[in-house]
Image (tube, grey):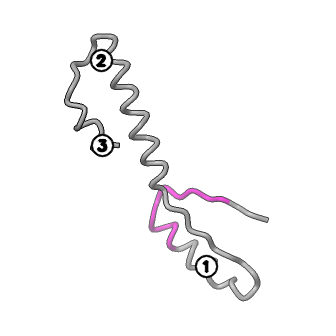
Amino acid sequence: MQIAVNFENETIAKKVLWILEHFKNDGVEVVRLDNTDDEIINNFKIGLKEIELINQGKLTSRPVQDFLNEL
């Protein structure tokens, strides 16, 4: 069985991981996933919203390089 858990609070995540590490001898495997993919996706969504606002005339455009640096 696999369980995926997302922690908003890093302190709690560290505590839970510490507990789970004690079950390694019983066959528990802890796989840590980085949330950088979520951050990239969120930045992309923010960029798309900016483009929509620019197309609607509600926001002025800015240099493309600024946008790409945020991605």
Residue 1 screen position, x and y as percent? 79, 65
Residue type, numbered disc 3: Glu
Residue at 49% x, 61% y is: 34
Relative placement, left or right, of 56 versus 60 is right
**Residue under pointer 2:** 54
Q: In this view, does 67 lie above or below 12?
A: above
Upstream in sequence: badge 2 or badge 1: 1
Pinpoint residue 33: horizontal percent, then vertical percent.
55, 63
Residue occupying image coordinates x 35% and y 23%: 51
Residue drawn 48% across and 56% down?
Answer: 35
Which residues are the magenta region?
A: 4-14
52 drawn magenta: no
Which residue, as the protein is rendered here, is positioned at the far right?
1
Q: Name the residue under label 1.
A: 19
- Mark 2 to mark 1 CA distance (whole Å): 49 Å
**Of the numbered discs in the image, which one, if any, rests on residue 62?**
none
Q: Would you name the residue on which mark 3 appears?
A: 70
Give whichever of discs 3 and 1 has the lower sequence position.
1
Q: Is mark 3 on a helix, strand or loop?
A: helix
Residue drawn 27% across and 44% down? 69
Q: Earlier in the sequence, mark 2 or mark 3?
A: 2
Question: Badge 3, how many Cα within 10 Å: few under 14, some, many 20+?
Answer: few
Going by the numbered disc 1, the residue's amino acid type is Ile
Query: Which numbered disc, 2 or 1, marks the residue closer to the eye?
Result: 2
